[in-house]
Image: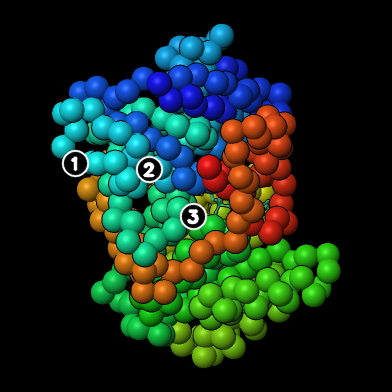
């Protein structure tokens, strides 16, 4: 038996009120079962929404872990190491690294026992637990939004743009780097910090990642925005073909106005909790397309493409073209105090953070 600790919840609410640390034991694997040890699992905004009960995908509350009430396990992605395998496991062996095939399987746990069919084997050569543990949600989202919503027949390398808000998010940082690799300029919008030095530091951080330009939300919403775009895009000769929106509200409408005819604005998040207003003229005269993207649904529908996408991102990572996101590592030692773990989850939706928290075992 292996002793395991798991962050579970049996009802929806604020993480600090509903998350529980549960201890249980895992038997030796049989058949196609695989025993796993956690390497790294991040706390993403959607994980918190899921615990709050406001996220569309809700893992079922189950009794399999022996919790007093039926419960679900927090977390949707992570890197795990195989510690032992059942006799019918064909594709995995001890020491291999894996990620979960689907979201919603619960990753905030020191150990797990899953079926081989639920796992994707990772070629760990040259990769860190952080890189593997954070690949499935943010980088895949950025990758698919750019690949699948750009008309690649039109893209002329170095002469076209995408615009995005939340540019310092995990998704935003991935989009900056992928766009650079694929020859698309990026106009990145961040929220200004109280201290102007911090705003400048964040701008520089994104420029170092490969951003073409970084502006603040205040600049986006100001009367100067048109002139800023005009200048950046060589007097408007370089079209902005795609907008990526994880904020909503006025921010999203302002980005839409900068788009060239027939472009897409893809909404994938709603951090400001304000609806996206679609100006009628942009729909009628510019034929803009307003779409949404959800990586969970996309991944469930396209499992093979998801694996290929992950592999592609790992290749870029190994080649130094895809840098780590800033994170706060939370070492989940065996004696780790419950309240410290829960605090990290609770703090995830407060803005202006230096990076997301990640459980490391
Ligand atoms: P991170 O935790 O890496 O970053 C959070 C981002 O949200 C930061 O840029 C932060 O900016 C910004 N933010 C926080 N609060 C607000 C606010 N009130 N108004 C505007 N911006 C705010 O996030 P992720 O990259 O993991 O996720 C970003 C968004 O994308 C989330 O909404 C998430 O749910 C969504 N998402 C959606 C996916 C999909 O498939 N649809 C997949 C992955 C993510 P600041 O530093 O200024 O606070």
Q: Tell me whether the residue at label 3 lies in contact with that at label 2, contact meaning CB atoms closer than 8 angstroms.
A: no
Task: Determine the CA span between mark 2 and mark 1.
Answer: 14 Å
Q: Residue at x 49, y 26 (%)?
A: 4
Q: Residue at x 59, y 88 (%)?
A: 231
Q: Earlier in the sequence, mark 2 or mark 1?
A: 2
Residue 91, which numbered label?
Answer: 1
Residue 81, which numbered label?
Answer: 2
Residue 177 picture location, percent across and down: 46, 71
Task: Determine the CA span between mark 3 and mark 2.
Answer: 13 Å
Question: Does 217 appear above or below 28?
Answer: below
Q: Residue at x 81, y 73 (%)?
A: 196
What kind of element bears circle 3? helix
Residue 77 picture location, percent across and down: 45, 42
Mark 2 Cα shell of 10 Å, populated few (<14), some (14-19), many (≥20) = many
Q: Tell me whether the residue at label 2 lies in contact with that at label 1, contact meaning CB atoms closer than 8 angstroms.
A: no
For the question of whether residue 164 can be seen, the reply is yes
For the question of whether residue 291 can be seen, the reply is no
Q: Residue at x 23, y 28 (%)?
A: 86
Q: Which residue is mark 3?
A: 130
Q: Number of callouts in the render? A: 3
Does the closest atom of ligand 1 sit within 8 Å of the Cβ of label 2?
no
Closer to the camera in the image, 70 or 287: 70
């Amino acid at each position: 038996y292996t002793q395991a600790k798991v962050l579970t919840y049996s009802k929806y609410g604020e993480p600090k009120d509903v998350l529980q640390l549960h201890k249980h034991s895992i038997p030796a694997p049989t058949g196609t079962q695989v025993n796993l040890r956690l390497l790294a699992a991040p706390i993403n905004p959607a994980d918190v929404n899921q615990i709050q009960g406001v996220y569309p995908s809700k893992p079922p509350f189950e009794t399999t872990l022996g919790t007093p009430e039926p419960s679900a396990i927090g977390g949707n992605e992570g890197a795990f190491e195989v510690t032992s395998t059942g006799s019918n496991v064909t594709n995995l062996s001890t020491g291999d690294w894996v990620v979960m095939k689907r979201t919603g399987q619960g990753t905030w746990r020191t150990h797990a026992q899953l079926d081989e069919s639920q796992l994707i084997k990772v070629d760990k050569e040259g990769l860190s637990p952080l890189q593997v543990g954070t690949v499935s949600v943010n980088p895949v989202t950025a990758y698919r939004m750019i690949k699948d919503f750009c008309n690649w027949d039109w893209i002329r390398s170095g002469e076209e743009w995408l615009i995005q808000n939340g540019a310092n998010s995990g998704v935003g940082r991935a989009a900056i780097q992928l766009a650079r690799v694929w020859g698309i300029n990026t106009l990145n919008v961040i929220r200004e910090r109280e201290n102007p030095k911090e705003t400048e530091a964040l701008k520089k951080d994104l420029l170092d990642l490969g951003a073409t330009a970084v502006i603040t939300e205040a600049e986006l919403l100001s009367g100067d925005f048109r002139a800023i775009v005009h200048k950046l895009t060589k007097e408007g000769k370089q079209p902005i073909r795609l907008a990526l929106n994880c904020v909503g509200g006025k921010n999203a409408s302002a980005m839409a106005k900068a788009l060239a005819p027939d472009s897409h604005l893809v909404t994938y998040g709603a951090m400001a909790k304000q609806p996206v207003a679609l100006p009628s003229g942009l729909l009628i005269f510019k034929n803009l397309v307003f779409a949404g993207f959800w990586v969970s649904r996309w991944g469930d529908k396209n499992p093979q493409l998801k694996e290929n996408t992950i592999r592609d991102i790992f290749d870029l990572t190994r080649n130094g073209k895809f840098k780590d996101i800033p994170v706060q590592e939370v070492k989940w030692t065996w004696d780790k105090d419950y309240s410290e773990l829960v605090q990290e989850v609770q703090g995830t939706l407060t803005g202006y953070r230096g990076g997301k928290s990640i459980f490391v075992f």
